[in-house]
Amino acid sequence: MLGNFFEYFLSTGSNDGRLAVLGATSGDTGSAAIYGLRGKKGVDCVILYPKGRVSEIQKRQMATVPDDNIHCVEVEGTFDDCQDIVKASFANAEFRDHVKLGAVNSINWCRVLAQTTYYFWSYLRVTDAEKDVTQVNFSVPTGNFGDVLAGYYSKKMGLPVGDLIVATNENDILHRFFTNGEYHREDIQKTISPSMDICVSSNFERYLYHLSGEDSATLAGWMKGFETTGKLTIDGKKLDEARSDFKSAKADTAETLDTIKTYHGRDGYMLCPHSAVGVSAIKQLDTVDSATVCLATAHFAKFGDACSMAVTPLPEIPKELSCLWSMKIRSSPCPNDAAVVQGFVEKRIEERIAKHEKRDSTRKIIQNMVLISAAVGFAAFGVSVFRRR
């Protein structure tokens, strides 16, 4: 949806017909952005991902896309480092304006808007099947807080949502916040659910805006203190309000693997490590019932090494993923340095524009030659006919 929106508005002349999308991914949303933007006219898509912190298939899903408007960058660091580079790039007005910078994934409001559809569609399907259900609970494996925030907005829009459950892995800053009001930054732990290995959730600031009473000055003070100290603490009525909006749970590696093993053995359903965190959460909170939906996040085959720790042998891998191993990888290594990444973005965009201008110039020359040849041929035919007369 977002890719089509971009291409349509650029075709009308918006943003001078050009957009450079810069995004950071912990593994899954990067490939979603890439497939949504590949080949889109006027759009360059640059996706940053942390080296060694995404699965091999996740990397290949991104880096094997051959379209020349797609640029993958492997950053020496964590997802939070990648996200910090994106935020720093948007704060650099000269760079932002020069490349016509735009956002994708969780940072872009359009993404959150699109995700509200999951909640409405799921609610309708559950209440179709379960006539006595009036409210539906949702458990959401959470890293950047975007998907579960869409559930919060769906509830605000009037959808009969019961509990919204924030499910985290060992990187549990959100669970700690909803438990004791402490949004305190810690080092990121590398886990078997890498797409959730996030410490600072970009969309959480959007929720904090509502929690502050939609007071931008209060929010600015909270975030300034967090950026300075790495800590944001709330208590009292604000914490009570947050707890009424969301429940939370944490599933560590052992609990995640046990959930995968249990559901595969009992139900024949193969969960990915992220989806399993969401399922573990509803078990911990005793909400396993026909009124609860767990939002699944990925296919298990993208995390074969992790899933094989719980189930062996694994079910057959779909051909759409197995074919990635024979495809050429296009990715560029970069240090954890915003200036270096920004220089890379500028260079790649300039190269692609120059390539397309050359191609368009060649195409125009060929078209003119064809037109001239056609005109000459038509004139010769006319002369031939005239002479015969």
Image: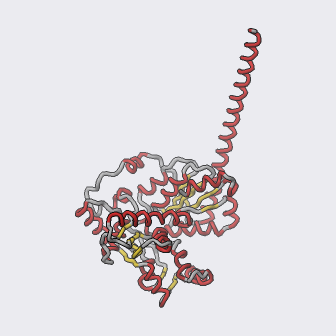
Please state the total of marks drawn on the protein image.
0
Tell me the residue at 68%/56% (across/down).
Answer: 14
Q: Could you tell me residue 372's position as x and y percent? A: 73, 27
Query: The C terminus lies in which quarter of the figure?
Result: top right
Tell me the residue at 50%/49% (across/down).
Answer: 65
Splitting the image into 4 quarters, where does residue 229 fall? bottom right
> From this viewpoint, is residue 192 visible?
no
Tell me the residue at 48%/50% (across/down).
Answer: 64
Which is nearer the eye, 35 or 325? 35
> From this viewpoint, is residue 88 visible?
yes
Q: Could you tell me residue 262's position as x and y percent? A: 25, 66
Splitting the image into 4 quarters, where does residue 5 fall? bottom right
Q: Could you tell me residue 208's position as x and y percent? A: 53, 79
Which is nearer the eye, 230 or 173? 173
Q: Please, which colouring scheme is shown?
A: secondary structure
Report the residue that reaches farthest toward the front: 131
Splitting the image into 4 quarters, where does residue 288 fall? bottom left
Tell me the residue at 38%/57% (across/down).
Answer: 302
Report the residue that reaches farthest toward the bottom: 236
